[in-house]
Amino acid sequence: MTSEDIKEVIIAIIKDIDEEADFDGLDADKPLRDQLELDSMDFLDIVMELRKRYKLQIPEQDYPQLATLNSCVAYLQPLLQDA
Amino acid sequence: MKTSRIVITGIGLVAPNAANRHEFREKLIAGRSEITEIDLRYFGKAPAGICTFPETLYRKKKENKKGTRAGCIGVYCANEAIADGGLDLSSCDPARIGIYIGLTEHGTVETENEVYNISQYQYDVNYWTHHHNPRTVLNNPPGEISMNLGITGPHYAIGAACAAGNAALIQASQMLTLGEVDVALAGGISESVGSFGIFASFKAQGALAEAEDPRQASRPFDRDRNGIVISEGGCVFVMERLERAVARKAHIYGELVGYAMNSDARDFVLPYGKRQAECMRLALQRAGLRADQVDLVNTHATGTRQGDVEECRAIAEVFANCPSTYINNTKSIIGHAMGAAGVLELAGNLPSFDDGIVHPTINVDNLDEECALANLVVNTAVRPGGLEVLLNNSFGMVGINSTVIIKKFNG
């Protein structure tokens, strides 16, 4: 997957959680949670959806690496290179 | 001890045929059932009462997805009750409002859904949702109401099978009397139509209704009844002490003047008329009323032979020689809304204080002789006028009985 593909996947998952989420002006280097009003349960929804879609078991200590859109790409790209 | 007078000042509801009290009353008087057919995973088709209401009127779709159906129904009903009661939340101390919600069961729907979900992943529990616990804790429905409204007083659920709605009103009344809260949001909610297990269990018990036309499936007191129609729904009342209601010039729907709860202590599922009669008598005694002062009895009857007959025997005994006491049944029109049944039925009958009408029990084509109570209102509404005292029965499995008595407030 390219970095753009991964960004699209993350955005699609968040849209699934909140179809009214507003991505206009989203800063890819700032925390998704603050910008999109996601709480801890929403964040776990993202982790679960990655598990369901790509069989990814993301360890809890790695959760901080999913904080921003760009950090998601950096973390997930090696894991999803063959996806 | 000086006891407080507790009144109902707001009503919010959703039933299988209505999303507000006006529509509900109109359809009950007309005897208009909107029971439909549900098709459930594993189980198949059955008559059921499904509610249609604006689900995103009071919270976002995202919150509805995160929460439960019961929470969604509860948030709608609570907001409607507050609006109907003219309660300005910004002028209330949120820590002095209590939320008391009766539930027959909770978590069954969510658990079944989650087991189905992991079945799609070879039962790998790594796919079990993190939402399971907050969705299935028993205080989930009242908790979702508290989060939605920013109410910081106590919120909890009262589990009393199908007597739970009445039990929540009683709990609210007690908390108001004790001065624990100034305002109570009290009622009952059911999301049971989402559970194949609840349908399958009633069917296994030989107590699930069947009918070609689902609107004719719920037929308490009819010789050809064949069981219960399961419905979802909810009803929340605003309740407060009389002096507070008068001070804020609230419309008072009625005063809770008596209540009782007791237990059969004998069988998991079979009802027991003797204890039901004791429950009604105790409520009358506490209200300081004679049976002949009751104008309308709302029956719990669900359309099972034994349940209907036991309750009718109990009513015949308690209300012997009460020529002006009318008797009706709401489940014939809306099905059995489980934890919401008692409160929805009360909300459906309360307007009789103002319009003088007793809504009918429908689907009685051949009245069971053992249910042939004097003044049972069958198939067509009656308009006796002057209705001032309503006795509301709600009974539940594992032998729990509840009766509340509401009196018209005459100033």
Image (cartoon, coloured by chain):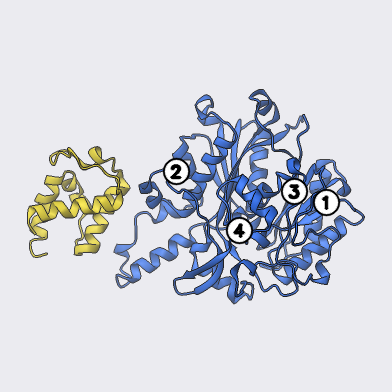
Chain colours: A yellow, B blue
Q: Which chain is home to disc 2?
A: B
Q: Helix or strand or loop: what does disc 3 sit on? A: strand
Check disc 1: other Cα within 10 Å, few if <14, some if 14-19, many if 20+. Answer: many
Tell me whether circle 4 and circle 3 mark residues in contact (CB < 8 Å): no
In this view, the mark in front (2 or 1): 2
Q: Is residue B183 above or below residue B58?
A: above
Q: Which chain is home to disc 3?
A: B
Q: Residue at x 84, y 45 (%)?
A: B285
Mark 2 / mark 3, whichever is N-terminal: 2
Q: Which residue is mark 4?
A: B338
Q: Which residue is mark 2?
A: B57
- Distance (Cα) linking label 1 and label 4: 24 Å
Q: Which residue is mark 3?
A: B260
| Quadrant where the image shows the C terminus of chain B | top right
Give the amino acid at mark 4.
Met
Q: Which residue is mark 1?
A: B281
Give the amino acid at mark 1.
Arg
Tell me whether circle 3 and circle 1 mark residues in contact (CB < 8 Å): yes
